[in-house]
Amino acid sequence: MSKAVITITDADFETEVLKAEQPVLVYFWASWCGPCQLMSPMINSAASAYSDRLKVVKMEIDPNPLTVKQYQVEGVPALRLIQGEKLLESTEGVIGKDKLLSLLAKHLDTN
């Protein structure tokens, strides 16, 4: 499984997220968003830490209004943890690494 964060668009969303075999962390961001720049390294870290159990994608909000509207993204950075058609977790605003890893562990850890 790839450890890299995949950049997607509205057109890719169904294939890359809804039809993925494992849970997908969708990171909504914007190029003009300062806090998004702070969260990017943490998102990359999560992609590496959970590469065996999680797919991580990022979507820029401005060119992708359909998915942004569908998942009610009102502010960035925003995260949506999705498995199949089901929304497992949703956050908006900057969160710390501990909170992110805790949120992911709740759904991904098998222990």
Image (spheres, rainbow, N blue to C red):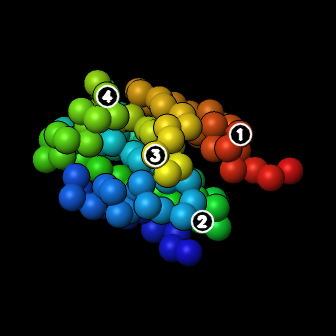
Number of the label disc, if any, that sits on residue 51: 2
Sequence-earlier tag: 2 or 4: 2
- In which quarter of the view is residue 11 placed? bottom left
> Quarter holding the N terminus?
bottom right
Q: Residue at x 28, y 35 (%)?
A: 70
Q: Is residue 7 left or right of residue 64?
A: right
Please provide percent x and percent y for residue 36: 34, 39
Which label lies toward us, 4 or 3?
3
**Residue carrying label 1:** 106
What kind of residue is marked 3? Glu
Mark 2, other Cα within 10 Å: few <14 / some 14–19 / many ≥20: some
Mark 3, other Cα within 10 Å: few <14 / some 14–19 / many ≥20: few
Q: Nearer the viewer, residue 23 or 40?
A: 23
Which label lies toward us, 1 or 3?
3
Question: Contact, CB < 8 Å: mark 2 with mark 3?
Answer: no
What kind of residue is marked 4? Gln
Q: Is residue 109 above or below residue 33?
A: below
Separation (CA) of disc 4 from disc 3: 15 Å
What kind of residue is marked 1? Lys
Q: Which secondary structure lies at badge 1? A: helix
Sequence-earlier tag: 4 or 1: 4
Q: Is residue 66 left or right of residue 43?
A: left
Sequence-earlier tag: 4 or 3: 4
